[in-house]
Amino acid sequence: MTTGSIETKPMSTEPLILWETDGHVGIVRLNRPKVLNALNPQLMTQLAEQMEAFDAEKEIHVILLAGSERAFAAGADIGDMAERSMLQMYERDQFATWDRIRRIKKPIVAAVSGYALGGGCELMMMCDVVIASETTQIGQPEINIGVMPGAGGTQRLTRAVGKATAMDVILTGRFLTAAEALAAGLVSRVVPPEHFFSEALNIAQALAAKGPIALRLAKEAVLKAFETTLAQGLEHERKLFYMLFGTQDQKEGMRAFVEKRKPHFKGE
Ligand code: HXC
């Protein structure tokens, strides 16, 4: 196992994120426990850099993004934003980093527990498979501090749960329980708090045993469903499906089935 941390914030004694690898899984942990993993721009930059590094590393097939048991992330760092002017916010273009995470091609599993609020909820919604502990509370409470979601909350939440629940969550600022989030289609699975990380890792490991090219293209195809008409989405899906017949992994996967053995995918 390889581990590491990145420290960029001057004067800070704790790294903003921690990373390690476990087999073919690249793990990133948010690491600002004192402020419930509030997402400041420095942390987001480091997160994007580490995810891009995992995305480029052939041995890594799946990325696992985790917070702590108390908080996945309680939102963007309010202290960092409080006194900024419109122009300062506009010019620093902090969402450019979020766009980098949006372009990650490998599947991202989220291990979520405690608070996933504001930018924390928005970051969670940029992940692909969300494993949530029973203690998870999910919300977009920006309305309570005089603003609104800015990193995709109004768009991704509405697409995930529909207008009625999205309006309720965004306009009232109330938190959804894990059970509500599961019923609404916002998280993939709910597990006991003591298992949220291990379960997410198990699922990431299970994904990592699949064909890595098929994983990436399947992610791309599902995400297309948010951006196209049905006809365009079907067309795109079909092309990606045909593309997989140009891979060794397709031959290996189908031959292994016929030969009644386990496939060994190489990502080729
Ligand atoms: C900065 C934060 C923070 C945040 C919590 N803290 N959330 N600091 N930004 N988003 C800090 C607190 O100030 C406190 O620091 C410490 O973390 C522990 O929090 P408490 O409030 O003491 O804990 P608790 O009473 O358990 O309440 C938890 C909470 C509450 C319900 C999550 O902290 C809260 O409401 N936080 C803000 C949630 C929010 O509004 N998020 C949206 C942010 S705007 P001290 O120093 O006092 O111990 C946003 C816009 C996204 O996300 C746009 C794109 C980037």
Image (tube, helix red, strand yellow):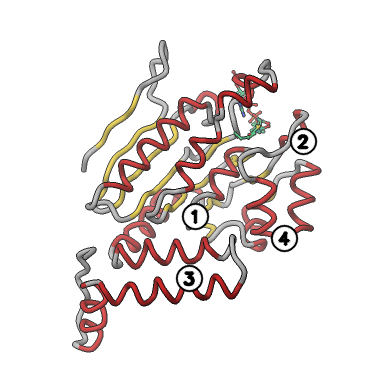
Q: Does the residue labelled 1 lie within 8 Å of ligand 1?
A: no
**232 or 191, nearer to the observer:** 232
Q: Alpha carbon of mark 3 to alpha carbon of mark 1: how far?
A: 28 Å
* Upstream in sequence: badge 4 or badge 2: 2
Residue under label 3: 236
Q: Are marks 4 and 2 in contact (CB under 8 Å)?
A: no
**Residue 181: horizontal and vertical position, in percent?**
64, 56
Disc 3 element? helix
**Residue 253: horizontal and vertical position, in percent?**
25, 77
Residue under label 1: 131
Residue at horizontal 27%, vertical 76%? 250
**230 or 176, nearer to the observer:** 230
Q: Is residue 199 left or right of residue 172?
A: left
Residue under label 4: 162
Q: Alpha carbon of mark 1 to alpha carbon of mark 4: how far?
A: 21 Å
Which of discs 4 and 3 lies nearer the camera? The answer is 3
User: For residue 165, what is the image quadrant?
Assistant: bottom right
Q: Do the residues labelled 4 and 3 touch (CB within 8 Å)?
A: no
Picture quarter with ligand 1: top right
**Residue 226: horizontal and vertical position, in percent?**
59, 61
* Upstream in sequence: badge 3 or badge 2: 2
Residue under label 2: 143
